[in-house]
Amino acid sequence: MTAKLIKGTEIREVILEEVKSGVEQIKEKHGVVPGLVTILVGENPASISYVTLKIKTAERLGFKEIQDSQPEDISEEDLLALVDKYNKDDAINGILVQLPLPKHINEKKVLNAIDPDKDVDGFHPVNVGRLMIGGDEVKFPPCTPAGIQEMIVRTGVETSGAEVVVVGRSNIVGKPIANMMLQKGPGANSTVTVVHTRTKDLEGHCKRADILIVAAGVPGLVKPEWIKPGACVIDVGVNRVGEKISEKTGKKIAILKGDVDFDEAKEIAGSITPVPGGVGPMTVTMLMVNTLKSLKFKLGIA
Ligand code: NAP
């Protein structure tokens, strides 16, 4: 059997078109567009490329976007004041502080200073609590888990009553996606197991999964024989396992591998995400969804 490929690159385009049309409708009716600010401290090349992608995507959708670049030596006090300025700015619906921050700044303090109603990353403790309660309480589900859930639902995989096994318990992927899948409601209602490094029988748990979500950061951790025939496999892992020369640009690029042995797993699974091109493109996409949602909440039309 060859699994259906769940392509994040294709699902992304469909969702971004939906967001774009949502922006156009609000602009026409209410005369406003979503505003997103990205605060970048210092010149870390990876951070610059992430921020550039977010800003370009926001621009393409017709958002008002601001990239606020600050020097590496900005004080914590000045950074907190900047966050406060955007908290009070009516034209801004989403605030992102690109991580990592320099060592002299307390990251937690800065992230917790963001107004929870503009925390489109969904990492503020208030939003984590809202996610836990579920239902109408949820404002901004964190972007990678939200992307995973969208992929499962849009592929037509039944989640209600499904055995979902999540490998990994991080605050950014494992815990929130486990929480989202067990909520009472559409795209969820699953029976969820979370496994980690202290789990006794990793293989046994994985073998039971109708939906297997792997976010460990260990290349090839999940063996093909651990996959239940026909299961939906979401491979969140992005592991650099070497370098190659790009045929397109002639430049050196990383060779990426997921946490699942893709070539063999695709012969057993019912559907599976590739790496790259699977979960990866969904994170920025869901950030745009959350920013539009933030404006809708403000206008009372969410
Ligand atoms: P993390 O914070 O390092 O957490 C990894 C989790 O996996 C931990 O809970 C760890 O267990 C568990 N784990 C590690 N090795 C294991 C093993 N051998 N057996 C069982 N469990 C194991 O990682 P993360 O931030 O969640 O990211 C996970 C992966 O997803 C990474 O490859 C990352 O690059 C990728 N990622 C991709 C996206 C995207 O595509 N948009 C977004 C976020 C992350 P313990 O808690 O017991 O240590």
Image: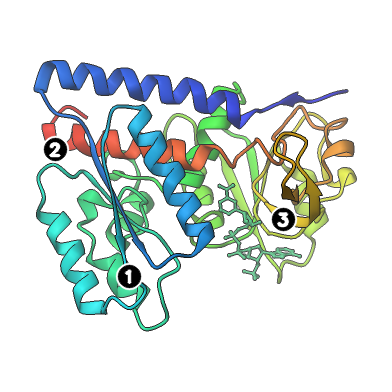
Q: Position of residue 245 (x, y in %)?
A: 79, 46
The nearer-to-camera label among 2 and 3 is 3
Quick one: 58 or 157, which is closer to the camera? Answer: 58
10 Å crowding of disc 1: few (<14), some (14-19), many (20+) = few
From the Cβ of disc 3, is ligand 1 less than 8 Å away? Answer: yes
* Residue picked out by circle 1: 71
Quick one: 193 or 156, which is closer to the camera? Answer: 156
Which kind of residue does numbered mark 2 sit on? Lys
Q: Considering only vertical position in the picture, is 159 above or below 234?
A: above
* Residue picked out by circle 2: 298
Mark 3 element type:
strand
Q: Position of residue 56 (x, y in %)?
A: 40, 37
- Regarding residue 159, the answer to whether it shows in the image is no
From the Cβ of disc 1, is ligand 1 less than 8 Å away? Answer: no
* Residue picked out by circle 3: 239
Real-space Cα separation, disc 1 to disc 3, in angstroms: 30 Å
Q: Residue furthest front?
A: 250
Nearer the N terminus, badge 1 or badge 2?
Answer: 1
Mark 2 element type:
helix
Mark 1 element type:
loop
Q: Where ligand 1 lies, by image quadrant? A: bottom right
10 Å crowding of disc 3: few (<14), some (14-19), many (20+) = some
Quadrant position of the N terminus in the picture = top right
State the residue at coordinates (15%, 56%).
87
Which kind of residue does numbered mark 3 sit on? Asn
Real-space Cα separation, disc 1 to disc 2, in angstroms: 32 Å
The nearer-to-camera label among 1 and 3 is 1
Which kind of residue does numbered mark 1 sit on? Pro
Quick one: 56 or 292, which is closer to the camera? Answer: 56
Circle on res. 17: none
Left/right of residue 138 with respect to residue 263 in the rendered view: left
Q: Looking at the image, do the residues carrying marks 1 and 2 touch, with CB atoms under 8 Å apart? A: no
